[in-house]
Image (cartoon, rainbow, N blue to C red):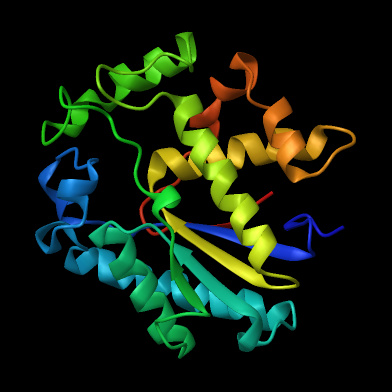
Amino acid sequence: MDSSSVGNNNRYWVLRHGKSIPNERGLVVSSMENGVLPEYQLAPDGIAQARLAGESFLQQLKESNIELDKVRICYSPFSRTTHTARVVAEVLNLPFHAPQCKMMEDLRERYFGPTFELKSHDKYPEIWALDEKDPFMRPQGGESADDVVSRLATAMESMEAEYQRCAILVVSHGDPLQMLQNVFHSAKLQEGGGLAERFQMSRVASVLSQHRKFALLTGELRPLI
């Protein structure tokens, strides 16, 4: 099995959105209500990052002899991820609608809760410290690491059910993507069972607390391994 393939012989890549206006302003924008607003889409630097990621993805597809009709782009509904996915689709010359591009709500940003929303992103380390201590503990009114992994598992199951032998680009956010890589890495080490069962076996504190090891820069593309 290829290192980035799983289940229905799909291959996965992850892409964190390009540098966004919230990134530039140093703001936490994590609620769906705020996240979908157009004023929180990509900054000019982020558009350039998304274009570079699209070109890199296209090159990797060519090197793997993957035809563009087998490419699927699944993305978070937030404006910064939708914007990123749209730029990548333009680079690949793909139509930005089904079946090749699909918005998936379960790929949305981690909700950090009302205490952190629209506050300085300097507060992120407080939550990551909490994750290391107890990944099942929710920031006040927000999502725990395990909450995010639960919906990411649902998203992966949905992709596996819908697509066969596809190259799937998952466009999402820093925390969800580092958690997805972390649990995916652990699931591949588990023996027996399907993807869903192996994901479930990986939802333990010793695994969930380690997601920061898989952190991505804005606009960073990686095979999911």
> Residue visible at 63% across and 35% down?
183
- As drawn, which residue projects farthest toward the top? 133
- Using residue 100 as the reference point, say whether residue 175 is left or right of it: left
Query: Which quadrant of the view contains residue 115?
Result: top left
x and y percentages locating residue 12 in the rendered image: 64, 60
Question: Which corner quadrant of the image does residue 76 belong to?
Answer: bottom left
> Where does residue 50 sit, x and y in percent of width and height?
36, 69
| Residue 99 vs residue 185, the one in the foreground | 99
Q: Residue at x 60, y 35 (%)?
A: 182
Residue 51 visible in the current orientation: no
Q: Is residue 121 above or below residue 9?
A: above
Say above or below: 122 vs 137: below
Residue 128 horizontal/vertical position (percent): 38, 21
Q: Is residue 142 above or below residue 65?
A: above
Please provide percent x and percent y for residue 56.
52, 73
Q: How many marks?
A: 0
Q: Is residue 175 visible?
A: yes
Residue 118 vs 100, above or below: the answer is: above
**Residue sitting at x 41%, y 23%:** 144
Q: Quadrant of the N terminus?
A: bottom right
Left or right of 79? Residue 24 is left
Q: Residue at the location (30% across, 72% down)?
A: 48
The answer to whether residue 77 is left or right of residue 11 is left
